[in-house]
């Protein structure tokens, strides 16, 4: 379970909730321009766009959950079980493994139009990173400041969907979510009549944790979001959008004493290359700036995420 969202108010913000039952030692990770990306079936890329996002680093390789590059293009992977199909290698295609898909696109594309052109020649191949890191069934949201694209691997190849609402969750496929959204177009943020309770214009807005419901609620909250255009206000608003569909511990039980929760929420100002995040027990926003690092380096730069609660004692 995950939710990814775009928000534009002057600058473009791209973020997501990562909803899982366990952490995999994810870290905020910056890949500089000269880091040597080795692709499974393509030439190494030693000079490319720099990127920042959340990743688990294995054998010095960033397995990105989501990232944004220095040109403002962003990409997030979301769980897509029972629907994702990775195919055998195909002649005449760029055969790319799922684990390297985000670096493959973000290293060379500066906007959604360029990404779409590249995707038309891409085949996602069922090659895992290692025996310890098998492929996960995924689909992806790709966004820039003006448009979004959903990529879903199927038995017929990659399906590309223009995404007019800039939101993505999990199953079912994206075309279902877009169709299902029409059932809620009558909801409004305006007051209705002389009701005793405010917010009645949104009666019927889903509140459960299913992917279909999170899609509808995230789209409604994003569409009606208001902030004053300052960085602080926009970032705060983005985290409020994500918190509206976050999963509290105990609400989604996976097994005995195992619960899926929102491990972290992220927000990247893609216009300025600033990555923000919060974690489940630490709601204080942590900020990492892409441009405050050596973008011409050859080694990954990573920052362990802050998971411990951080309290401000006012009168001590």
Image (cartoon, rainbow, N blue to C red):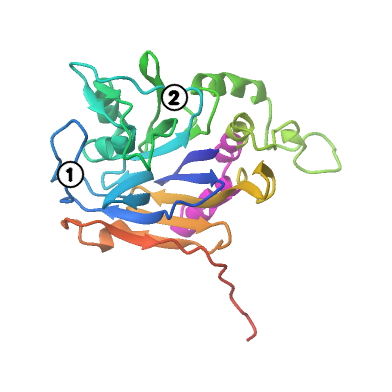
Pick the front one: 281 or 206 = 281
Q: Looking at the picture, how far across and down is residue 215, in whole percent?
A: 58, 32
Q: Disc number at residue 48?
A: 1
Q: Which residue lies at the image location 32% right of the left edge and 59% below the top edge?
A: 302
Residue 116 visible somewhere in the drawing? yes
Q: Is residue 127 above or below residue 173?
A: below
239 falls in the magenta region: yes
Q: Quarter of the image containing the C terminus?
A: bottom right
Which residue in the structure is indicated by mark 2?
84
Closest to the camera, between mark 1 and mark 2, is 2
Q: Which residues are magenta?
A: 218-243
What kind of element bears circle 1?
loop
Q: Bin the neighbour count of mark 1 within 10 Å (Cα to Cα): few under 14, some 14-19, many 20 and up.
A: many
Q: Looking at the picture, how far across and down is residue 102, in whole percent?
A: 32, 38
How far apart in space, not on screen, are marks 1 and 2 (Cα)? 28 Å
Q: Is residue 125 above or below residue 252?
A: above
Q: Bin the neighbour count of mark 2 within 10 Å (Cα to Cα): few under 14, some 14-19, many 20 and up.
A: some
Q: Quadrant of residue 141?
A: top left
Q: Main secondary structure of the magenta part?
A: helix
29 falls in the magenta region: no
């Amino acid at each position: 379970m995950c939710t990814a969202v775009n928000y534009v108010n002057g600058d473009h913000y791209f973020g997501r909730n990562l909803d899982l039952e366990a952490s995999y030692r994810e870290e905020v990770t910056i890949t500089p321009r000269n880091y040597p990306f080795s692709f499974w079936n393509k030439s190494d890329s030693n000079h490319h766009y720099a990127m920042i996002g959340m990743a688990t680093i294995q054998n010095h390789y960033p397995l990105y959950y989501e990232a944004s590059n220095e040109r403002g293009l962003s990409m997030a992977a979301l769980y897509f079980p029972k629907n994702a199909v990775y195919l055998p290698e195909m002649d005449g295609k760029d055969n790319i493994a799922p684990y390297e898909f985000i670096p493959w696109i973000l290293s060379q594309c500066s906007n959604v139009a360029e990404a779409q052109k590249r995707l038309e020649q891409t085949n996602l191949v069922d090659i895992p990173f290692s025996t310890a890191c098998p492929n996960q069934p995924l689909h992806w949201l790709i966004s820039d400041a003006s448009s979004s694209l959903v990529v879903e691997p199927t038995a017929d190849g990659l399906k590309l969907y223009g995404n007019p609402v800039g939101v993505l969750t999990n199953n079912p496929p994206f075309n279902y979510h877009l169709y299902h959204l029409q059932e809620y177009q009558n909801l409004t943020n305006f007051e209705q009549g002389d009701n005793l309770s405010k917010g009645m214009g949104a009666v019927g807005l889903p509140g459960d944790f299913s992917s279909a419901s999170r899609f509808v609620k995230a789209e409604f909250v994003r569409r009606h979001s208001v902030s004053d255009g300052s960085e602080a206000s926009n970032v705060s608003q983005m985290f409020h959008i994500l918190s509206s569909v976050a999963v509290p511990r105990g609400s989604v039980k996976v097994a005995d004493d195992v619960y899926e929760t929102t491990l972290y929420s992220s927000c990247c100002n893609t216009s300025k290359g600033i990555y923000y995040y919060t974690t489940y027990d630490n709601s204080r926003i942590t900020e990492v700036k892409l441009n405050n690092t050596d973008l011409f380096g050859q080694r990954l730069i990573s920052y362990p995420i802050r998971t411990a609660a951080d309290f401000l004692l006012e009168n001590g």
